Image (cartoon, grey):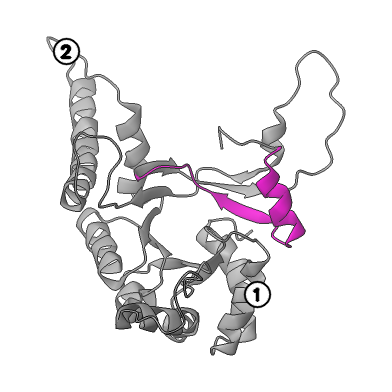
Amino acid sequence: AEHIRTDDERLAAMANAGITTVLAVPDGTVFPGRSALINVAPPADEPQIGSVGDLRDGLLVVKAPVALHVVYTDRPPGAGYPSSLMGVIAFVRQAFLDARHARAEAESYAAKPVGRERPRPDPAFAALLPALDGKLPVAFAAQELREVHRALAMASEFRLDPIVVGGLEASQAAAELKVAAARVIFSLNVPMRPKTLAPDADEPIRALRQRADALKAPAALARAGVTFAFASGGLKDPKDFLKNAAQAVKEGLAPDAAVRALTLDAARIAGAAD
């Protein structure tokens, strides 16, 4: 919410495609930051009177923060630690543990400060505390089944409120998602056959299966009672968003469930159903 560019041409492209509101997430991996719910077009702005004007970006912000985002990657940026997927997972766990410890240290100092050095406040740890308290959902980027299981395991360990983002194979873990009360932000940027691939070229069976089953997943999530919303992230043309949502209906998703995934259920996941 602090870094919105109200003149970003992507906002106009989304508005032209019929998308009114987006979940904006900072760039980055591991802990990109906290997302904000943003309207793509600001309302009419009242003329400013006096020497101090209101920030125009505030007209776009519906809610902030919405969720803390976690992106596991097997190729972390930079040359230092962590340098592998295993290291990233360990880093995320350690960050939550350190945030918990930092709070306990601060509380101990507040109760008995005499003769002790005051703990240094750390804004990064402070940003993790609402998630550890269950007051801020944690959105894990997870496409494949093992990534979904990894996210649910982390959420269970730290009693987090989980959201799965991407969800290509999330329907295969629908029962576990339902038990964990996890929501899914399902990406409609689904796998496509590479245009550079020769017509008679062989492809791994996993890739073929993912492509064939991708848009069947929303119907499976709906049948399992898992709340989900559609996401447009990664689509080169925002107009493909509604087209792919319609394709999910052809693959078995009830039309009213598709409409909810574009509207009310998306708002519920963002905590803005009102």
Q: Which mark is on residue 117? A: 2
Indicate the position of residue 68 as horizontal and vertical percent values.
Answer: 40, 47
Q: Is residue 156 above or below residue 124?
A: below
Which kind of residue does numbered mark 2 sit on? Answer: Glu
Please name whichever residue, 141 or 209, is drawn nearer the observer in this view of the structure: 209
> Which residue corresponds to the image point at 41% horizontal and 69% vertical from the top-left?
167
Is 14 included in the stretch rendered in magenta? yes
- Nearer the observer: mark 2 or 1; the answer is 1
Within 10 Å of disc 2 (Cα), the crowding (few <14, some 14-19, many 20+) is few
Spot the residue most to the top: 115
Query: Is disc 1 placed on a helix, strand or loop?
Result: helix
Q: Which mark is residue 243?
A: 1
The quadrant of the rendering that contains the C terminus is: bottom right
Q: Which residues are the magenta region?
A: 7-29
Given residues 205 and 272, the one toward you in this image is 205
Q: Quadrant of residue 248?
A: bottom right
**Residue 106 figure quarter:** top left
Q: Residue at x 64, y 68 (%)?
A: 240
